Amino acid sequence: MSANADESGMSDVLLIDDDGDLLHSLARAIAPRIGSLKVTCATSASIGLDLFQKHRPAVVVLDLCIDERRGIESGFDLLREVRGVDSSSRCIVITGHGSISHGVRALQLGAASFIEKPADPEHVASIIVDAAAHAELRRSFDKAGRRKEDSPASALIGRSEAMRGLRDRIAFIATTQQPVLILGETGTGKGLCARLIHECSPRRAGRFVHYQPNFGGGDLMQSELFGHTKGAFTGALESRAGLAFEAHDGTLFLDELDELPPEIQVRLLDLIQERRFRPVGSDSFRKVNCRFIAAMNRPLDEALEGHKLRRDLYHRVAHSVLHLPPLRERVEDIPDLCEATLASMRSRELVRVFELSSDVGDYFKSCSWPGNVRELQAVVENAAYHAHYQGRSFITRQDLSSNHATPSGHENIAFHERVERFKSDLVEEALARCEGSQVRAARMLGLDRGTLRRILDRTEGTR
């Protein structure tokens, strides 16, 4: 127990009273009754507040009349300041003259309880012990909440049952070492979920290596994935380790697994099963220790029956299967997704738009969103730019009709068709600006190249 206000150690209980004799008498009386809790004393509001800010004790016991010149208002002011610094601490107020009204006012300002003078040490001690337990419980709860908010899985926005289940499923999968197959439509967040599994896993210190099929042939893909030796083929001036080796002790994410050519899929069988691979041009295998995550947006039955995905590879990689729900099946998450998109825009740009009008929110919930979250984000961003240009802090239907997603004069066209036109317009514009280069256009739009190819295929099929 500290007998003065200059105590530099930690404290669990802080007693504040301008009467030093009564203060230390109370401290000595309660010390044997509060177990291992440590007591610190302060004889003025300023010293008490300094000690509180320094130690953040679980319990504060303060006399309302801490300054005789100002009377009880000095105690109420101190109570407000303490609560403002750390509301998880429990404050116990001691009142004089039998004033119940003062105690009630203290409770209204956030005090946990009040005691009338003269205070019985045993009674004070029991209240302190109970208050300390409540403070510890509150702080543990707040700490758990902060961990949850700071955890990688908090990037999955939404309070729907589907999203709660998805977060729980990712948390479980992250504890295992099994290969994972993520299934979901375009724009549902397969890449995000793959990265979250890695960041929540014991492999988080290792690299997360993302591989996506490119427009090159099988030889180029083999070189990218498995590396090559110097001179293995024309242009191989130096040896290359390959992405599989770069993922050693980390995670290898194979996006659009069904777009890989058959010869690559065969080589993946050995990589996943035996944890080894042979670089192009090499006669020996290299061992690798990494986790495998794969993803597809093509329906699984279609990929297997159309021979886009080997069944033996499917069985190797699908030890755990994660199904991502489309946005149309969790429309209750749309307000949170819109709010997050607008908050992101405000933080990175000078777009001061804060909310949607109620009719826009209802309209969004009625849409099918074939492009899912990615499409919603694009529509909200476009609308926010227009609202900002018009000097509004909220999005209206007028802002929607001004962008490509809902062009004016086409109200009778199905929303899905409007979205497809919007996508094809964006792709064609990007291709024109990139002189026909699909790789550069995909990078400009922030799309994966497979998605850009599918948009082009659908565009050609409707002409």
Image: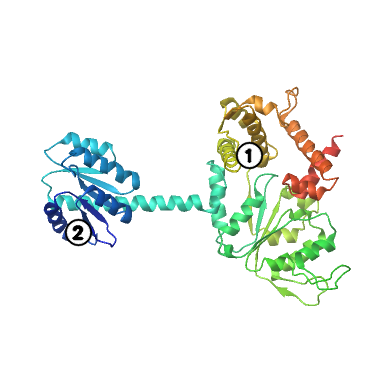
Q: Disc 2 residue type?
A: Asn
Residue at point 36% right, 52% down?
139
Mark 1: give few (<14), some (14-19) or many (20+) Cα within 10 Å.
Answer: many
Extreme residue toward the front, this view? 69
User: What label does residue 162 carry, if any?
Assistant: none
Q: How is the image coloured?
A: rainbow
Residue 178, image quadrant: bottom right
Gap in angstroms between the C-alphas marked 1 and 2: 62 Å
From the viewer's perspective, tell me whether residue 240 is left or right of residue 154. Answer: right
Relative to 155, is 175 above or below? below
Q: Nearer the viewer, residue 65 or 199?
A: 65
Residue 278 percent coordinates (x, y): 77, 72
Position of the N terminus, as image quadrant, is bottom left
For label 1, the SS is: helix
For label 2, the SS is: loop
From the viewer's perspective, tell me whether residue 6 is left or right of residue 120. Answer: right
Residue 46 percent coordinates (x, y): 25, 49
User: What label does residue 4 carry, if any?
Assistant: 2
Residue 309 visible in the shown view: yes
Q: Which residue is disc 1 drawn over? A: 327
Residue at point 58% right, 58% down?
199
Residue at point 33% right, 48% down?
88
Residue 10, image quadrant: bottom left
